[in-house]
């Protein structure tokens, strides 16, 4: 199994996040799903198909949930996957766990702007998922969300 280029794939996710239509009540996030051989399976970004869709949700919706590549895949998300939401029945954390994706790479953890205490990182690790944080890319991943703190 080749070593995945975490920085390169996160850069791709950041590029996708820049495609999000800006919103005052939601983050702009990009996500890329990559197989064990370092090939892109699918990608998505916030508000790609409707006003409520999250990046991870959009990427996962483009692939058969029984696709065998998911069992060895990595999902790159510019923001920690949500652990609760009001717009959909399942959080992105629940979707990732249901897809049995063993590895998640994030650039930054969700601040308490919309959700008081996001538990995505903790819930994923507690379920045995490897979660890697790339804090050196956090500023780039936050950049398209600067309007939220104005």
Image (spheres, rainbow, N blue to C red):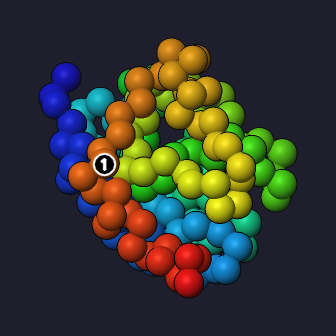
Q: Is residue 146 above or below residue 132?
A: below
Q: Position of residue 15 (x, y in %)?
A: 34, 69
Quadrant for the C terminus, please. bottom right
In front: 41, or 120?
Answer: 120
Work out whether residue 82 or residue 113 is closer to the camera in this orientation and state it. 113
Most foreground residue, 17 or 26? 26
Q: Is residue 59 visible?
A: no
**Quick one: label 1, few (<14), some, or many (20+) residues within 10 Å?**
few
With 76 as the anchor, is 7 left or right in this view? left
Direction from residue 120 to residue 128 in the image, left or right = left
Residue 27 image position (x, y, % from top left): 58, 67
Residue at image point 28% right, 56% down: 137
Q: Is residue 46 visible?
A: yes
**Most distant residue in the left direction:** 2
Figure quadrant of the N terminus: top left
**Residue 67: percent from left, percent from top:** 52, 32
User: Which x, y percent locates residue 122?
Assistant: 56, 28
Helix, strand or loop at mark 1: helix
Q: Which residue is mark 1?
A: 135
Question: With 67 as the anchor, is 51 left or right in this view?
Answer: right
Above/below status of 146 relative to 27: below
Q: How many marks?
A: 1
Vertical comparison of 69 with 5: above or below? above
Residue at x-position 24% and y-position 43% = 6
- Residue drawn at the location 48% of the way across and 53% of the way down: 79
User: Residue at coordinates 67% horizontally, 80% vertically from top-left?
Assistant: 24
């Amino acid at each position: 199994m080749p070593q995945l280029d975490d920085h390169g794939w996160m850069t791709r996710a950041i590029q996708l996040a820049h495609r999000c239509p800006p919103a005052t009540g939601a983050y702009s996030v990009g996500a890329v799903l990559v197989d064990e051989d370092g090939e892109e399976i699918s990608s998505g970004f916030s508000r790609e198909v409707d006003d409520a869709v999250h990046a991870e949700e959009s990427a996962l919706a483009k692939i058969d949930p029984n696709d065998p590549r998911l069992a060895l895949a990595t999902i790159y998300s510019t923001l920690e996957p949500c652990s609760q939401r009001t717009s959909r029945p399942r959080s992105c954390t629940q979707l990732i766990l249901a897809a049995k994706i063993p590895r998640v790479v994030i650039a930054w953890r969700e601040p308490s702007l919309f959700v008081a205490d996001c538990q995505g990182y903790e819930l994923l690790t507690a379920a045995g998922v490897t979660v890697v944080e790339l804090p050196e890319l956090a500023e780039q991943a936050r950049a398209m969300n600067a309007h939220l703190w104005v």
